[in-house]
Amino acid sequence: MLEITNLEKRFGAVAAVDRVSLTIPDGQMVGVIGRSGAGKSTLLRLINRLAEPTSGQILYAGEDVSVLRGRPLMAWRAHCAMIFQQFNLVNRLDVMTNVLLGRLNYHGFVASMLKRFTPAERAFAIRALDRLDMAQTALQRADTLSGGQQQRVAIARELMQEPKILLADEPIASLDPRNATIVMDALRTINREAGITVVCNLHTLDTARAYCDRIVGMFKGAVVFDGSPSELTVDAARAIYGVDGLDEALSESVTSTSIGPATGATVPSRLAVA
């Protein structure tokens, strides 16, 4: 279980994350939504310890993650993998090697660059790629792939870390609807089949409602909504996005579409009203 208590990250007088407290059970898929600058990315970076909290505590299975240093911190980052909007692949390397670089924390940089991986690790990499329908690209250079394919390779690389938690920072923001659907389907499959906790920052309400067990809404660094998709009403969304932001989202929903699960197609955008 991941337990976050009064977590805060300040930049001078500005609180990017403002006294956030959340308890996330193992195996849950959580969508974090909010306007740009709401603190979503900073929250994930704090959990992964890519950023240092100003105050507060992060516990996982009773261990105080917020004070880890050195090797224990590296081990935490392996168990709490991070997927970024930018795919961060090594373009000149083939897909298989990019995925195997997920074992960096187990081998070290030099051994990884020399491709000193075991047969078992190579088999693990192929299974990870196959789970994401990418095994056929194993020998291709990374820069020959589409954006959606590269994101799936990035997910496979993080699976090589054998994570307990998978943090995804706007993983579909740069993808077209079809590839966004494929990536979100993959994340949900990993969550369901492997039991890995997934915490995913998302821009669209409909994506969060379609894929996530739980939605956390942030506004100006604070959590202003925490509930199930069915509880995300117009009033709740207005608290997350503000009047102007919500009105814009609702206006766009009249003419736009958003991705839906498992279909590979787009579905009309909608927001629950209660």
Image (tube, helix red, strand yellow):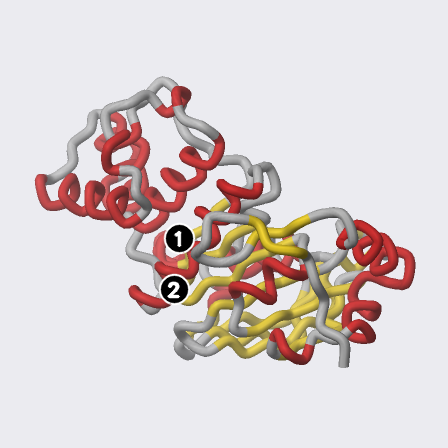
Q: Which amino acid, by three-letter code, is at mark 1?
A: Ala
Residue 31's image quarter? bottom right
121 or 235, nearer to the observer: 235
Closer to viewer: mark 1 or mark 2: 1
Figure quadrant of the N terminus: bottom left
Kindly tell me whether residue 37 is visible in this rendering.
Answer: no
Residue reaching furthest right? 244
Q: Which residue is painted at 51% across and 42% down in the image? A: 178
How far across and how far down the image is residue 15, in percent? 79, 60
How far across and how far down the image is residue 153, in percent? 36, 38
Figure quadrant of the C terminus: bottom right
Q: Which residue is mark 2?
A: 191
Q: How many residues crowd around disc 1 within 10 Å: few (fewer than 14), some, or many (20 or more)? A: some
Residue 273's image quarter? bottom right
Query: In this rendering, would 23 be left or right of 68?
Result: right
Q: Which residue is painted at 23% across and 25% down in the image? A: 139
Kindly tell me whether residue 36 is visible in this rendering.
Answer: yes
17 or 250, nearer to the observer: 250
Q: Which residue is painted at 59% across and 48% down in the image? A: 170
How far across and how far down the image is residue 126, in percent? 20, 41
Q: Which residue is mark 1?
A: 186
How far across and how far down the image is residue 154, in percent? 40, 40
Query: In this rendering, would 266 be left or right of 189?
Result: right
Q: Secondary structure at mark 1?
A: helix
Which of marks 2 and 1 precedes in the sequence?
1
Q: Which residue is painted at 63% across and 51% down in the image? A: 258
Q: Which amino acid, by three-letter code, is at mark 2?
A: Asn
1 relative to 14, above or below: below
Disc number placed over residue 250 in the picture, else none:
none
